[in-house]
Image: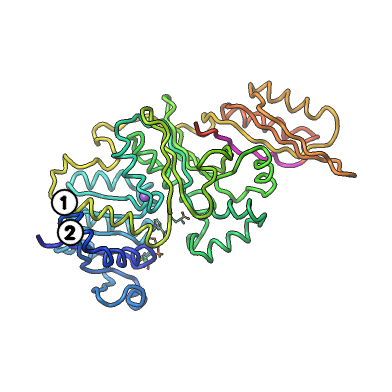
């Protein structure tokens, strides 16, 4: 059988990994897929740069649209990133009857519904294992391996850059700006690292996980997104003293009333496996009603780890190429006519526990005022530490851990506590999850 013909759009980090691994594992891949997978051509903005990175064995074009719709191409692999022109190219490839493999989580989190509907109508596959947690086969695990379960929640470290920053801040006591520079130098961060540090990249990935876990459309616009830029070294230290680690988590949970979809720094017990995932590694915990918790760990970024996921998709598509579209795994794990309309809950309805740090006057009565406000709002205290004021100091740090409460109640309590004359700085609030 003639090998399937692949077109690569983009010639950057992931594309170069795909070219290398496809060449290296060619024979093994043919044995797995039952058919050859042949790179036909690459579209690159700068052909000289692409040739320098990828060699000159393959034809290189600058006409992305012509390649994406060329009649002899079977699968278009989009590795450019960004929304436009990636969206137009993917839709054109689908309209031309091509299968698509993409690593573009931003595109799918924002335009996935349109893209999957177009693919469904045309009977082609859009595969996206590389879009979430890079080389970890988490899409495969959730959509297929855990299909017997009602998924209850997913929580994951799904951005390598921010996990690296938090690990280095904790282990070496370095400040945020210094570690971010290191992350950039090591190639973990995006060219514009705002997407990493503001939580947007993790929210794109959490949005996709949410859709395939609960069978709802992708709804990035409803995600709550908070990054790590406001985190202070003092809170990482206090969390440690209390037996917790702070991680940037993507969390999605089915509460029965609706679905939580949120990304924010989170205190998790230091004894949990996921609390010990360090550096640029990713890890995802999936809680199923039948299986209980399962944990997936590995490299979420980088050239060959991400290529591993792209090529797994190429093997899948090659195997399923001739299958009746009705017999393929649905894009969002559930049949398109059986999607749920369960709403994504607004953040003020989310229920979680909290870590609060207050800079307070070192005088009697302060604690009584604060605990009264928390009690008024129905919030119960789980633990409390007060740092001894140093000699000559008139202020001290008070750390409060609460039990689960509704975010709206916590907002009200923080608003009231903040107006007390004895509270001297903006109150720090970090959400806390036991993950069990
Ligand atoms: N790098 C990783 O570790 C990683 C991991 C998972 C997913 N991804 C995703 O994979 C995709 C590619 O990432 P990358 O790290 O290889 O990026 P990159 O910047 O290294 O490569 C992107 C390539 O696409 C080309 N390109 C970008 N915009 C273009 C445009 N408007 N017109 C023409 N060409 C354009 C660039 O010239 C470059 O060749 C992105 O969607 C990214 O989010 C990357
Ligand atoms: N910048 C991303 C790349 C992988 O998606 C990260 O740090 O996880
Ligand atoms: Na993956």
- Does label 1 or label 2 sit earlier along the sequence? 2
Give the percent coordinates (x, y) of residue 27: 21, 63
Residue under label 1, please give it: 321
Which quadrant would the N terminus be assigned to in this image? bottom left
- Residue 74 is tagged as 2
The answer to whether one can see residue 299 in this image is yes
Using the image as rendered, state which of residue 78 and residue 404 is in the foreground.
404
Indicate whether 48 appears above or below 352.
below
Task: For mark 1, give the secondary structure.
Answer: loop
Q: Is 432 within the magenta?
A: yes
Give the percent coordinates (x, y) of residue 192: 50, 61
Q: Are marks 1 and 2 in contact (CB under 8 Å)?
A: yes
Q: Is 55 within the magenta?
A: no
What color scheme is it? rainbow
Category of crowding for the residue at label 1, using alpha-carbon neighbours closer than 10 angstroms: few (below 14), some (14–19), many (at least 20): some
Task: For mark 2, give the secondary structure.
Answer: loop
Answer left or right for 8 relative to 375.
Answer: left
Q: Nearer the viewer, mark 1 or mark 2?
A: 1
Instruction: Identify the residue shown where x is 41% and y is 42%.
Output: 207
User: Which segment is the magenta one?
Assistant: 425-433
Answer left or right for 99 relative to 275.
Answer: left
Category of crowding for the residue at label 2, using alpha-carbon neighbours closer than 10 angstroms: few (below 14), some (14–19), many (at least 20): many
């Amino acid at each position: 059988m003639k090998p399937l013909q692949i077109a690569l759009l983009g010639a950057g980090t992931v594309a170069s990994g795909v070219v290398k691994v496809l060449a290296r594992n060619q024979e093994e891949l043919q044995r797995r897929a039952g058919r050859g997978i042949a790179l036909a051509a690459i579209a690159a903005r700068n052909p000289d740069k692409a040739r320098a990175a990828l060699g000159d064995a393959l034809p290189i074009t600058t006409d992305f649209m012509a390649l994406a719709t060329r009649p002899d191409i079977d699968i278009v692999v989009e590795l450019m990133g960004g929304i436009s022109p990636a969206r137009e190219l993917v839709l054109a490839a689908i309209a031309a009857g091509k299968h698509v493999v993409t690593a573009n989580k931003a595109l799918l989190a924002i335009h996935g519904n349109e893209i999957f509907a177009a693919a469904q109508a045309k009977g082609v596959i859009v595969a996206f294992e590389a879009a979430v947690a890079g080389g970890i086969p988490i899409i495969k695990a959730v959509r297929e391996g855990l299909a017997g379960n009602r998924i209850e929640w997913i929580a994951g470290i799904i951005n390598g850059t921010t996990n690296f920053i938090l690990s280095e801040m904790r282990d070496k006591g370095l400040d945020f700006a210094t570690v971010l520079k290191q992350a950039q130098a090591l190639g973990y961060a995006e060219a514009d690292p705002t997407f990493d540090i503001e939580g947007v990249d993790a929210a794109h990935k959490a949005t996709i996980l949410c859709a395939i876990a609960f069978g709802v459309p992708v709804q990035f616009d409803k995600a709550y997104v908070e990054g790590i830029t406001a985190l202070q070294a003092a809170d990482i230290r206090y969390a440690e003293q209390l037996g917790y680690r702070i991680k940037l988590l993507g969390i999605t949970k089915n509460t029965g009333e609706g679905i939580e979809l949120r990304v924010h720094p989170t205190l998790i017990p230091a004894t949990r496996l996921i609390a010990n995932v360090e550096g640029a590694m990713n890890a995802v915990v999936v809680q199923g009603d039948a299986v209980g918790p399962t944990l997936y760990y590995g490299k979420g970024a980088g050239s060959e780890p991400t290529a591993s996921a792209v090529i797994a998709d190429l093997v899948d598509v090659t195997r399923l190429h001739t299958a009746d579209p009705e017999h393929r795994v649905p894009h969002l794990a559930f049949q398109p006519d059986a999607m749920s309309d369960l709403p994504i809950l607004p953040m003020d309805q989310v229920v979680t526990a909290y870590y609060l740090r207050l800079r307070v006057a070192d005088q009697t009565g302060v604690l009584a005022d604060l605990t009264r406000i928390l009690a008024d709002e129905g919030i119960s205290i789980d633990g409390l530490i007060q740092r001894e004021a140093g000699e000559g100091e008139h202020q001290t740090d008070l750390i409060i851990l609460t039990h689960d409460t509704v975010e709206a109640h916590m907002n009200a309590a923080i608003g009231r506590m903040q107006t007390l004359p004895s509270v001297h700085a903006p109150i720090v609030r970090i959400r806390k999850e036991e993950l069990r």
